[in-house]
Each structure stands twice: as structure tokens, then as C-alpha cells.
Image (spheres, rainbow, N blue to C red):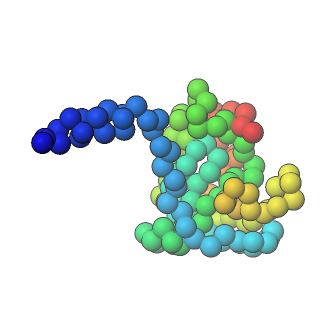
Amino acid sequence: MTRLPLLAGLAAAAAALPALAHADPCEGRLPARAGETFSGQVRYVGDGDSLCVGPGADPATWIEVRLSDFDAPELHSPTGRADRDRLSRLVRGRVLACVAVRGRNGRVIVYDRVIAACRLDGRRVGDLLRAAGGREGGN
């Protein structure tokens, strides 16, 4: 008995499933208190207002950040990929200095990300995004 029909059926079923979102690779310990500072090279950009910074190539040391001063449209929105690409062009591979802050809900960590104000060469990343044409409009 041949397995070809079974394999073809499995391949067709897999193709019909929606694409799974890839989880970000950032696995470092998140600062838990407002005012904690951290810095690192931008290793990953998830969307227009989320990124990971870390001291080296090991994702276990990368801290996932939700920028406190810019609210980009969601990645699945019509401009989402362009917003992510804009942030990536501005900061990917560069060193950010960040400080954990409380969000609107009073928490420092939301959705497994630390809310942080980050600066590149002394300038706020949100200001850099606005200067580069970034428009806010996220949730």
C-alpha cells in the first residue's frame, strides 16, 4: 500500500490552515519596576512599536520592549508592515538606552513586554519615528 495519497492529503490539509504567527525570539528577564534602566543593541523588531534589545546574540538575554512614547498601528493593519519596517530602519542594530515606565494601566509589564522609554543617541525613539513620517494609531 502506498502512502502517497495520505501524504498528499496531509499536505493539502496543512496548506489550508491559516499561517501561524511566529513568536518573537526575545526571552530575557524583563525589568519589573518603573525606573529600572537597561540598554542593548536592537536585535529584533516585531512591529511599529515593539522591539527587543540585548547585549549579545543569545535571545535568552534579549529584553522585549513596548515603546511608551509611540503607538503604532497593529502589524495586521494596512500600514502595519511599513510601520515595522520604518522602526527597523531607524534602530535595528543600534544601541538603545531604555528605562521601564508604567503604562496607562499602571503596570510595567504588559503582554510579556516591558513598557519603556528608549533613546537612541539621546533622542526619544517616538520622536524619531514621528520625524521619519510615522503616524500613530494603534490600540
Residue at left 58%, top 44%?
47
Q: Position of residue 68 (x, y in %)?
A: 75, 52
Quadrant assignment, res 111 = bottom right
Residue 11 against residue 24 in the figure, above or below: above
Residue 75 shows up from this direction: yes
Q: Position of residue 36 (x, y in %)?
A: 75, 73
Residue 122 shows up from this direction: no
Quadrant assignment, res 29 = bottom right
- Horizontal placement of 92 versus 135: left or right? left
Q: Where is residue 1 in the image (x, y as percent from the top left)?
A: 12, 42
Looking at the rendered image, the quarter that the C terminus falls into is: top right
Residue at left 73%, top 66%?
99
Residue closer to the observer: 112 or 44: 112
- Horizontal placement of 68 versus 128: left or right? right
Residue closer to the observer: 76 or 103: 76
Quadrant assignment, res 62 = bottom right
- Horizontal placement of 98 versus 79: left or right? right
